[in-house]
Amino acid sequence: QKEVEQDPGPLSVPEGAIVSLNCTYSNSAFQYFMWYRQYSRKGPELLMYTYSSGNKEDGRFTAQVDKSSKYISLFIRDSQPSDSATYLCATDMNSGGYQKVTFGTGTKLQVIP
Amino acid sequence: DVKVTQSSRYLVKRTGEKVFLECVQDMDHENMFWYRQDPGLGLRLIYFSYDVKMKEKGDIPEGYSVSREKKERFSLILESASTNQTSMYLCASSLWGQPQHFGDGTRLSIL
């Protein structure tokens, strides 16, 4: 079993829809949670970074963490064609003195005009 | 804004060659990382460094080495390139306790 599971998609939605992207993780030692957006032929770009359970909002993006069920989500409101990308969830814990980041394999999102 | 620059976007090399991938960051970050990204496998950590001249193995270090002579520069070396090292290589940097920031990657093909 992978430490971080993410549905690969692809996920196709019409422009303006609310998008829900999800990940589950298995290790309760994970402390920090991130979402990255990766456009084709580019590197991952940090979107959201959160520590505690609950919601964190930034513009059209909301990250949600539920540590009790080991579930993390990213919601995109009023989705735009420019949101079409692969979204990677990631978790982080201190391991032997360094921060080990574990990435999901990514969900490919397509927003159709 | 954090800027992580990888020297080449695309690179084609031959089997057995020694290959150097270069990465420079401009934000005085202590930590630097090298990953490879393959379809269905996600990002896998090759090596990382938390200080000049310091290096630690990641999850898949075999066939690779690294060099960090200056704080801003972290090099990945393929000692004798093989076809199974064809991949997207991503460099990242971070401050302690902060998330990693990535470069745009080098798509490496070994023929």
Image (cartoon, rainbow, N blue to C red):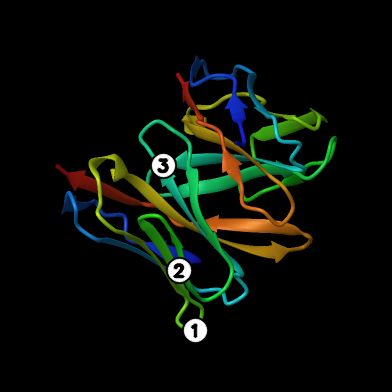
The subunit carrying tag 3 is A
The subunit carrying tag 2 is A
Q: Amino acid at mark 3?
A: Gln
Q: Amino acid at mark 2?
A: Gln
State the quadrant of the N terminus of chain B.
top right
Residue A19, above or below A28: above
As rendered, which of A26 and A87 lies closer to the eye?
Answer: A87
Q: Does dot 3 land on a helix, a strand or a loop? A: strand
Residue reaching furthest bottom? Answer: A68
As rendered, which of B22 and A109 lies closer to the eye?
Answer: A109
Closest to the camera, between mark 3 and mark 2, is: 3
Picture residue at 53% right of the left edge, 27% below the top = B82
Image check: B29 left or right of A14?
right
Mark 2 vs 1, N-terminal side: 2
Q: CA distance from mark 2 to mark 1?
A: 19 Å
Which residue is denoted by mark 1 in the rendering?
A68
Residue neighbourhood size for the residue with mark 2, other residues' Cα within 10 Å, grouped as few (<14), some (14–19), many (≥20): few
Q: Does dot 2 land on a helix, a strand or a loop? A: loop
Residue B95 position, x and y percent, is 72, 48
Residue A2 can be seen, yes or no? no
Which residue is denoted by mark 2 in the rendering?
A1
The subunit carrying tag 1 is A
Mark 3 vs 2, N-terminal side: 2
Residue neighbourhood size for the residue with mark 3, other residues' Cα within 10 Å, grouped as few (<14), some (14–19), many (≥20): many
Closest to the camera, between mark 2 and mark 1, is: 1
The circle on residue B87 is none
Which residue is denoted by mark 3 in the rendering?
A38
Residue A100, above or below B103: below
